[in-house]
Image (cartoon, rainbow, N blue to C red):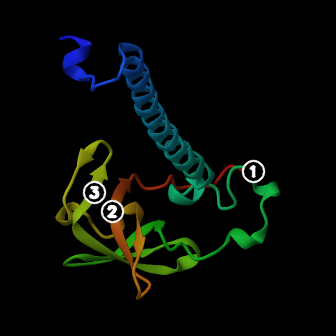
Amino acid sequence: MGLKKIFPAKDGQSKTLRIIILIVAGLIVFLLVFRFGVALGYRKAMFSYRWGENYHRNFGGPRGGFLKEFFSDRMDAIESHGTFGQIIKIDSNTIIVKGRNNVEKIIIVENDTTITRFRKTVELSDLKIDDYVVIIGNPNDTGQIKAKFIRVLPPPPSGPRRP
C-alpha cells in the first residue's frame, strides 16, 4: 500500500508535503494517547493515595490511625461511607451494625452488593447476628449507608489486650 493511496496528492502538492502532514497527524495522535495515559495514571495514583490515607478508617484499624500522635481529635467524624462493627439485626435487605462508640448504623444491601467471608462470596442470607463486618458504600439522604462491599470478619480475640 503506497503513500499515494493513503494520502492522495492534489494538484500542486509534493510528496514531501504529504509526508510532513502525515508526520504531524501521527504526532497529534501520539500526544492525545500520551495525554490519556497521563490522565489515567493520575486517577490511579490519586485512588491509591486516598485508599492508603483512609485504610485505618475503612478496615477498622487503630482509632486514630497507625500514627495516632500525629492526628488530632477532629478525625472522629461520623463514618458516612462505611463502618466496622457487629451485626445486631438483619431485616430483608437491611442490616443494623453496632459500630464504634456503640453507634448503630443502618446498612442497605442491594442486588449489586458484594459480600465476602474470607475469599468466598456469600449471600445476605448467610450473614448472622453477632457477625463482625466491614462495610464500604455510599451514604443516602436519610443517613443510611448503601453497601457496595461487605466483608465478614472473624470475631476479635477475647481476653486482655496488649498495649
Cα–Cα gap, marks 1 and 2: 28 Å
User: In this figure, which residue is indicated by the disc labeled 2?
Assistant: 148
| Residue drawn at the location 67% of the way across and 55% of the way down | 65
Q: Tag 2: Cα neighbours inside 10 Å, few (<14), some, or many (≥20)?
A: some
Work out which residue is located at the far top of the displayed protein and give it.
2
Q: Is residue 138 left or right of residue 118?
A: right
Q: Secondary structure at mark 3?
A: strand
Q: Secondary structure at mark 1?
A: loop
| Residue drawn at the location 75% of the way across and 50% of the way down | 67
Above or below, 123 against 93 in this view is: above
For marks 1 and 2 on the same chain, the one whose residue lies earlier in the sequence: 1
Q: Tag 1: Cα neighbours inside 10 Å, few (<14), some, or many (≥20)?
A: few
The numbered mark at residue 67 is 1
- Under mark 3, the amino acid is Ile
Above or below, 26 against 104 in this view is: above
The numbered mark at residue 115 is 3
Splitting the image into 4 quarters, where does residue 10 fall?
A: top left
- Under mark 1, the amino acid is Leu
Q: Is residue 58 left or right of residue 141?
A: right
